[in-house]
Image (cartoon, rainbow, N blue to C red):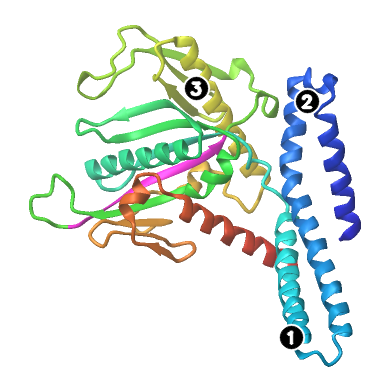
């Protein structure tokens, strides 16, 4: 392990120096790539340096213990220091093992989030709006930038479907565990009898694909324009600026009507289409993942879920890791940090266990 980290530290120092080279700063793409590599290496180098310091503490404590002789107080202090240093060394070893796990190549990418109402009619659409608000507020807390791509609103202000982009460093790593069926249990505003209803909303999180990752033949595309529309006459654009792109070989359809510019809508729609097609391609290449992208979010049936939002009890339960938090209001206001961190920790622990088997 020492040789590996010595090489990583050498590379880290090399990149640190190169970032001050005028020939590098003059090339934005090269500078960006080096900065990304530096950011990846930094926690590895810093953790290993802390590990070396902890090992040095063990050596010094052992020397002190040998020199203490019959001095009970000095022996006690040396033994205490030795135990603390050993515990720290073990913790840092575990941290290093986690840091050495293969990274998800999509973790640093911008994303596209697609939210669709499932079982539950209008109540499901209203909760889709709540999830959109939750994710938008969480993205803002992370200093990410969001852009709406497509929205199909209902008369009561919900969404049958809404898709939006989230741009920022590590966006996929913070959102990727949101893919799946989200179940809500509450008394709908339209319910006069006070009965609790159960509805579902599906969420899909797609890493945004770069143009170099996927070559799309223009001849495979059918591009249609139409007028934007909204519930109750809202957001109506009198010009045909909305775009619908159909990828003929796969039948994948993407719409974008958020911008008044037809060019901007086409650009956004192509970014969504490219991301969907890349995900399909990656799923086909990985036998462990279903080939159909709909497998990511299931059918929307009430019995399928990754998370439940129970309003009467004020709780949110993530069923994948068995975590229940009694702060539904703050979570729906974008306070997702505790949930996201717990999911990341559980994922790392599972990967670490698999790597050791």
Is residue 22 one of those drawn in magenta?
no
290 lies above or below 342: above
Task: For mark 2, give the secondary structure.
Answer: helix
On the image, numbered disc 1 is attached to which residue? 76
Q: CA distance from mark 2 to mark 3?
A: 28 Å
Q: Say which residue appears at 41% left-offset and 36% top-offset.
A: 136
* Quadrant in the rendering for residue 274: top right
Q: Is residue 2 left or right of residue 246?
A: right
Q: Is residue 291 left or right of residue 311?
A: right
On the image, numbered disc 2 is attached to which residue? 30
Q: Which residues are magenta?
A: 196-207
On the image, numbered disc 3 is attached to which residue? 269
Q: Say which residue appears at 63% left-offset and 38% top-offset.
A: 108
| Number of numbered discs | 3
Q: Earlier in the sequence, mark 2 or mark 3?
A: 2
Is label 1 in contact with label 3 (beta carbons under 8 Å)?
Answer: no
């Amino acid at each position: 392990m020492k040789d590996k980290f010595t090489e990583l530290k050498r590379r880290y120092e090399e990149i640190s120096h190169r970032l001050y080279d005028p020939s590098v700063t003059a090339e934005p793409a090269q500078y960006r790539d080096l900065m990304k590599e530096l950011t990846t290496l930094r926690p590895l180098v810093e953790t290993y340096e802390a590990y070396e310091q902890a090992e040095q503490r063990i050596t010094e404590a052992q020397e002190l213990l040998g020199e203490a002789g019959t001095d009970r107080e000095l022996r006690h202090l040396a033994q205490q220091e030795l135990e603390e240093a050993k515990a720290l060394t073990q913790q840092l070893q575990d941290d290093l093992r986690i840091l050495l796990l293969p990274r998800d190549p999509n973790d640093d990418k911008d994303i596209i989030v697609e939210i669709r109402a499932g079982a539950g009619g209008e109540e499901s659409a209203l909760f889709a709006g709540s999830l959109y608000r939750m994710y938008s507020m969480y993205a803002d807390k992370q200093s990410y930038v969001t852009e709406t791509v497509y929205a199909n609103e209902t008369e009561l202000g919900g969404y049958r479907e809404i898709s939006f982009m989230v741009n920022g460093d590590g966006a996929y790593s913070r959102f990727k565990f949101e893919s799946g069926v989200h179940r809500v249990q509450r008394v709908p505003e339209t319910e006069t009898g006070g009965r609790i209803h159960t509805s579902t909303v599906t969420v899909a999180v797609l890493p945004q694909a770069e143009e170099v990752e996927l070559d799309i033949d223009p001849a495979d595309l059918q591009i249609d324009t139409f007028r934007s529309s909204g519930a109750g006459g809202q957001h109506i654009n009198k010009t045909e600026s909305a775009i619908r792109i159909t990828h003929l070989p796969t039948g994948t359809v993407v719409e974008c009507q958020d911008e008044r510019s037809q060019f901007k809508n086409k650009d956004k729609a192509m970014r969504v289409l490219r991301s969907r097609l890349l995900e399909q391609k990656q799923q086909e290449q990985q036998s462990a993942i279903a080939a159909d992208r709909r497998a990511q979010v299931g059918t929307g049936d009430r019995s399928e879920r990754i998370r439940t939002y129970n309003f009467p009890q004020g709780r949110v339960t993530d069923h994948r890791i068995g975590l229940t938090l009694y702060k539904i209001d703050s979570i729906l206001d974008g306070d997702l940090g505790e949930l996201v961190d717990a999911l990341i920790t559980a994922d790392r622990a599972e990967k670490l266990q698999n790597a050791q088997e």
